[in-house]
């Protein structure tokens, strides 16, 4: 792979790779910084938020932004700012887990497909083609409708699966291509001739070579998953009340009130956009840095 | 808050001003009414439908035997019937049919058409779906002594029979068409109503035009109507931009305020209590909901009066009532209602009692899931409210909002596993025989999801249904309500409040406690 | 070449069959029942529900239902909608024009923006021009189309007290009314779409610029503009066309949320309704339609590659 060569070529002074990344990819570094802040805020949400996101206060419904409520309140008198912060928890948890599940499954399938080749490869590619021909949101919609809800530790597992499945064929395709490039190399043949087991060859030789595309896809799909979660929740098929979710904040009563209380849709929409923006910036730069040839 | 208060004042002023048009202006003929319908009818057969989405576009094409007089609800007037006589023993109903009523195809309506229609409803031929067979189970025979007379003979008296004949669902079909094909009305619209069917563009709109041969002279005033299938925010947007004149199901208070603000003096607001309520169903097949003390505690914990105050600002619920709509002549008046468990105005005392009951039942740390429908209005606010109420007596209740299909399945499947569910009870008129169905034993009622068997309630129901003396019926109804609210298999929460905002150009339409009645559009006109 | 085309066409069959099987059985596993849904909690006794299920053929074993449906689908008969009882193809037909038009308009917008912006971004790589175009396009990926739609409507309503027409008018009948309704959703989705294409355009040109023949051209002293327009652009276009094609295929059936926001009577809204109603026959036909569009677009792209890029081997 010329990736490794490229990196070595780029680092004559042998600075720390993180420093290198920041110097060469300022936009990506900004995105990463935003993600870190968002994650910290989400983790320490109870310390950051002025109100409990679930507490209903019929005394201050639909209050405009003020010093008490920075982003106003919703139709239940719940503090919009607090719900946005807790919504970051939902978005990051669902986004990250869905992307992890989808990308990992895709990577595993891609490597298997590439390593064994032949009929197995053909079969897997066939199945992936089938999955690929569903639009992401449509596939997620059907899976959500099929599986319903299953909440474990406050996270809807089925929602994660529904959002993750559409990523599988896309990741599998890219990873397979990278893995195929290695399969042809002489040292794999040598390893096979030396009698190494399939598992050992896959894990020792192929997996390290598909790490770069895997990481790139993983980052990119966190953004996609956050968008999918927002869309599904907006349609009423994702996260349900009273859990705080950005997409959910845009649907239901927000749609009824949005002319009179525009803060109810402006802030959640901005939150989604900023989060996705940050992940895209970071993902994009990560790709440019690690392997510009990969197309997400 | 201040703007809200100003708005509320404005709204009240508009109501006071507009509900009673002082000197009725002379209706103007002509114009096409555009209004919104929040959903779309699956097929065109009145007898097989139960949704308002059906009534609003389809009802103007048909006539019924009797109908509710919308401005004077619940007064019943003749539609196709000119006059009627009910025998003293309540066993014979004789109707005189108007002369010369024409169907849209030009044929003349006779008593035979009425008979054929009701035979189809009470005993549908194979392949025909009829949702209201049971309401007419007490009829033994329908006779047509002459073309203008139809006689219904009953097996036993039935207190709801006359209002049944005013049901908006009993569209009168042509006997000749039904004879050719009993399923004719599923795909074709052909009645005697004020408007002739023009077209239905699936997913988009429904069009009707004035029927020149309509039996009431000088009506309808409109030259036609277009029902647009639009819901939610796009519907409110269309109303506030003046694209459409009305939506006849009901708006949330927020929508009302928004529309009043956007339309200014062009907004006409009409409000009424609604024959709809959200109830909570406990799955009595399951522990600990098989324990009456637990169910009663959960009902006691709900501050209905306080909740009504708060929720009416954001949701279309407002009225506290028992099993019948508050304000309905057979309903329990407030003075008596507050003595029933769960309806006391002293919520703290009720909560103390609730905690004690839970302690007796060994369920102080009860945790369960409330299954709700993922429809924003009013299910979500009421669900959030209930969970908050139960939290206040120390219970941890999870909220599960399911998509409608899953929600219905969760309650209706064999051996359901839900704990408690928010359920709805919405009827086309005030009538105990309809509203009490939810509270009957599960083998007696298809809409009982609590799963209990309680023969005392069943027995009281049968008695009140056969009691045509109103005073005696009320006594029986009170007994029924008292037992139902002590046993708490299914508990009422807060009754709905219907709010309709129309454009001031729309005239001749009045609100009723049901969004199913008063929709034939015969009297509606547009002030150009 | 002909053999390649035939081979490629045969390969579509197992994919579509897979889609049909997967979709059919997934739907039957879905909890919930369309008949229950139709009654929506009405007081209807069980024998009435059972009679209705029998009438719709839902009481038969699943595999029999499947073969009946497949048999019909192969002869072009996709059955009747469970919900409306009308032919599925009729229901789709009346909505297809709208969805296609929005997809086409969004595509035009995307192409008009993406070609110049992507090229500029690549030529001026790592300058402020590149950075701002990248920010613009990454933002396009980040802003949810449905939210942009909500903001557009809010804007029109607040400033002009006007909303787009509620019913669809075919373009041929009244171009103005037609455009007034569809331009807004096209804008809302077109922004995202153009962002995707701009990014592809940029990276694809960057890649081509590293190729040997570009270096040769430059070394020969060919003007930079000529290098870009004659050599780089032509070769960079193929991947961009791919992205545009795939996005177009998705737009035809995938405007699910945006159509909801704008109340458009299109394929996406029909899809959401069909899913919520449990209208199996409708969902099956829609999913198949979307996959057919997707597969065909892919086929067309492959052909393009084969024609324009001699490096592709016909295997």
Image (cartoon, coloured by chain):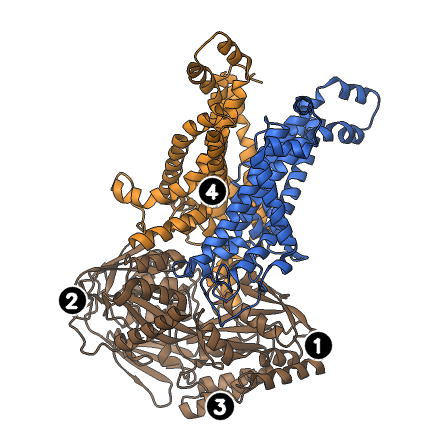
Residue at figure coordinates x 34%, y 52% from the top left: B204
Label 3 secondary element: helix
Same chain under badges 2 and 1? The reply is yes
Observer able to see residue C89: yes
Q: Name the mark on residue C254.
A: 4
Residue located beneath label 2 in the image: B28
Which quadrant of the view contains residue B166? bottom left
Write down which chain is painted orange: C
Q: Chain of mark 2?
A: B
Coordinates of residue B177 in the picture (x, y in percent): 30, 60
Give the structural element (helix, strand or loop) at label 2: loop
Chain depicted in brown: B
Q: Are marks 2 and 4 on the same chain?
A: no
Give percent across and percent down for residue C156. Answer: 33, 51
Q: Which residue is disc 1 drawn over?
A: B363
Distance of label 2 from label 4 (alpha carbons): 46 Å
Q: Colour of chain A?
A: blue
Judging by the rendered image, the residue that carries numbered circle 3 is: B336
- Vertical placement of residue A185 versus B128, above or below: above
Mark 1 element type = loop
Chain where mark 4 sits:
C
Q: Which comes sooner in the sequence, label 3 or label 2?
A: 2
Same chain for the residues at labels 1 and 4, yes or no? no
Crowd tier of the residue under label 3, counting other residues whose Cα lies within 10 Å: few below 14, some 14–19, many 20 or above? few
Circle 1 marks a residue in which chain?
B
3D distance between C-alphas at marks 1 and 3: 30 Å
Specify the label residue B429 is tagged with. none
């Amino acid at each position: 792979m010329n990736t490794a060569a490229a990196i070595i070529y780029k680092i004559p002074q042998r600075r720390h790779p993180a420093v290198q990344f920041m110097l060469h990819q300022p936009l990506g570094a900004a995105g990463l910084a935003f993600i870190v802040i968002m994650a910290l805020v989400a983790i320490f949400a109870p310390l950051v938020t002025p109100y409990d996101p679930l507490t209903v206060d019929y005394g201050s419904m639909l209050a405009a932004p003020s010093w008490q409520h920075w982003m106003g309140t919703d139709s239940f008198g719940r503090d919009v700012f607090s719900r946005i912060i807790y919504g970051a928890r939902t978005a990051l948890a669902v986004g990250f887990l869905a992307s992890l599940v989808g990308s990992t499954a895709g990577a595993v399938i891609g490597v298997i497909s590439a390593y064994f080749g032949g009929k197995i490869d053909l079969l897997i590619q066939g199945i992936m083609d089938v999955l690929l021909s569903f639009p992401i949101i449509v596939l997620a919609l059907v899976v959500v409708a099929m599986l319903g809800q299953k909440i474990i530790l406050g996270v809807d597992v089925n929602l994660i699966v529904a959002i993750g499945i559409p990523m599988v064929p896309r990741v599998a395709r890219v990873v397979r291509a990278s893995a195929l490039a290695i399969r042809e190399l002489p040292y794999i043949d040598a390893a096979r001739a030396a009698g190494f087991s399939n598992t050992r060859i896959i894990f020792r030789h192929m997996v390290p070579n598909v790490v770069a595309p895997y990481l790139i896809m993983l980052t990119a799909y966190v953004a996609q998953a956050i968008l999918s979660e927002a869309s599904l929740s907006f349609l009423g098929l994702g996260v349900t009340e009273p859990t705080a979710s950005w997409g959910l904040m845009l649907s239901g009563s927000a749609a009824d009130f949005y002319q009179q209380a525009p803060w109810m849709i402006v802030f959640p929409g901005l939150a989604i956009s900023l989060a996705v923006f940050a992940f895209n910036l970071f993902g994009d730069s990560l790709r440019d840095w690690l392997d510009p040839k990969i197309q997400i | 808050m201040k703007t809200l208060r100003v708005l509320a004042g404005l709204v009240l002023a508009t109501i006071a001003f507009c509900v009673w048009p002082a000197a009725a202006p002379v209706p103007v003929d002509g114009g096409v009414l555009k209004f919104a319908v929040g959903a779309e009818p699956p097929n065109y057969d009145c007898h097989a439908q139960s949704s308002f989405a059906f009534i609003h576009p389809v009802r103007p094409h048909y006539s019924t035997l009797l109908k509710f007089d919308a401005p004077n609800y619940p007064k019943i007037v003749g539609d196709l019937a000119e006059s009627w006589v009910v025998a003293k023993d309540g066993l014979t109903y004789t109707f005189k049919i108007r002369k010369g009523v024409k169907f849209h195809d030009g044929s003349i309506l006779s008593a035979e058409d009425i008979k054929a229609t009701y035979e189809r409803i009470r005993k549908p031929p194979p392949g025909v779906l009829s949702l209201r067979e049971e309401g007419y189970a007490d009829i033994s025979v329908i006779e047509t002594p002459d073309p203008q007379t139809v006689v219904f003979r009953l097996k036993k008296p039935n207190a709801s029979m006359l209002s049944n004949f005013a049901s908006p669902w009993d569209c009168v079909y042509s006997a000749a068409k039904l004879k050719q094909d009993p399923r004719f009305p599923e795909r074709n619209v052909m009645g005697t109503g004020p408007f002739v069917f023009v077209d239905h563009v699936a997913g988009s709109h429904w069009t009707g035009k004035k029927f020149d041969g309509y039996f009431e002279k000088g009506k309808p005033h409109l030259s036609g109507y277009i029902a647009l299938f639009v819901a939610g925010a796009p519907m409110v947007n269309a109303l506030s931009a003046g694209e459409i004149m009305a939506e006849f199901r009901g708006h949330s208070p927020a929508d009302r305020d928004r529309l009043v603000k956007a339309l200014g003096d062009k907004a006409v607001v009409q409000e009424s209590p609604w024959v709809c309520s959200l109830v909570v169903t406990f799955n009595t097949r399951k522990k600990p909901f098989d324990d009456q003390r637990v169910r009663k505690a959960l009902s006691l914990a709900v501050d209905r009066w306080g909740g009504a105050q708060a929720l009416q600002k954001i949701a279309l619920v407002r009225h506290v009532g028992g099993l019948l709509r508050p304000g309905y002549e057979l309903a329990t008046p407030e003075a008596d209602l507050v003595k029933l468990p769960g309806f006391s105005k002293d919520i703290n005392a009720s909560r103390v009692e609730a905690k004690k009951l839970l302690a007796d039942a060994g369920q102080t740390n009860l945790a369960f899931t409330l299954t709700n429908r993922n429809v924003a209005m009013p299910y979500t606010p009421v669900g959030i409210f209930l969970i908050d109420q139960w939290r206040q007596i120390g219970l941890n209740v999870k909220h599960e909002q399911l998509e409608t299909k899953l929600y219905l399945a969760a309650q209706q499947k064999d051996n359901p596993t839900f704990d408690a569910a928010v359920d709805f009870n919405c009827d086309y008129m005030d009538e105990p025989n309809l509203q009490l169905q939810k509270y009957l034993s599960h083998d007696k009622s298809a809409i009982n999801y609590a799963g209990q068997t309680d023969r005392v309630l069943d027995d009281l129901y049968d008695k009140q249904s056969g009691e045509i003396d109103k005073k005696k019926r009320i006594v029986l109804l009170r007994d029924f309500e008292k037992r139902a609210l002590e046993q708490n298999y299914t508990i009422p929460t807060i009754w709905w409040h219907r709010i309709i905002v129309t454009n001031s150009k729309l005239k001749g339409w009045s609100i009723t406690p049901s969004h199913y009645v008063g929709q034939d559009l015969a009297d509606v006109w547009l002030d150009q | 070449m002909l053999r390649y085309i035939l081979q490629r066409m045969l390969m579509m069959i197992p994919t579509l069959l897979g889609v049909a099987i997967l979709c059919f059985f997934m739907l039957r596993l879905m909890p919930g029942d369309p008949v229950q849904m139709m009654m929506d909690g009405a007081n209807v006794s069980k024998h009435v529900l059972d009679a209705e299920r029998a009438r719709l053929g839902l009481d038969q074993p699943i595999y029999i239902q499947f073969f009946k449906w497949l048999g019909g689908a192969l002869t072009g008969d996709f059955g009747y909608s469970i919900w409306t009882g009308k032919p599925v193809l009729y229901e789709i037909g009346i909505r297809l024009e709208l969805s296609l038009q929005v997809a086409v308009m969004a595509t035009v917008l995307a192409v008009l923006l993406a070609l110049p912006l992507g090229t500029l971004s690549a030529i001026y790589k790592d300058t402020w021009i590149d950075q701002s175009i990248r920010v613009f396009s990454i933002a396009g990926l980040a802003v949810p189309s449905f939210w942009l739609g909500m903001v557009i409507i809010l804007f029109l309503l607040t400033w002009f007290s006007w909303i787009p027409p509620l019913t669809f008018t075919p373009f041929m009948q009244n171009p103005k009314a037609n455009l007034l309704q569809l331009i807004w959703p096209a804008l809302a989705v077109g922004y995202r779409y153009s962002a995707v294409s701009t990014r592809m355009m940029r990276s694809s040109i960057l890649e081509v610029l590293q190729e040997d023949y570009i270096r040769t051209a430059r070394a020969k002293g060919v003007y930079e503009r000529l290098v870009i327009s004659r050599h780089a652009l032509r070769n960079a276009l193929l991947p961009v066309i791919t992205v545009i094609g795939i996005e177009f295929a998705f737009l035809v059936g995938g405007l699910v949320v945006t159509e909801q926001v704008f109340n458009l009577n299109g394929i996406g809204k029909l899809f959401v309704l069909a899913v919520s109603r449990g209208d199996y026959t409708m969902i099956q036909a829609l999913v198949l339609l979307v996959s057919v569009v997707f597969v065909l677009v892919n086929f067309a792209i492959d052909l393009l590659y084969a024609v324009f890029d001699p490096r592709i081997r016909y295997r």
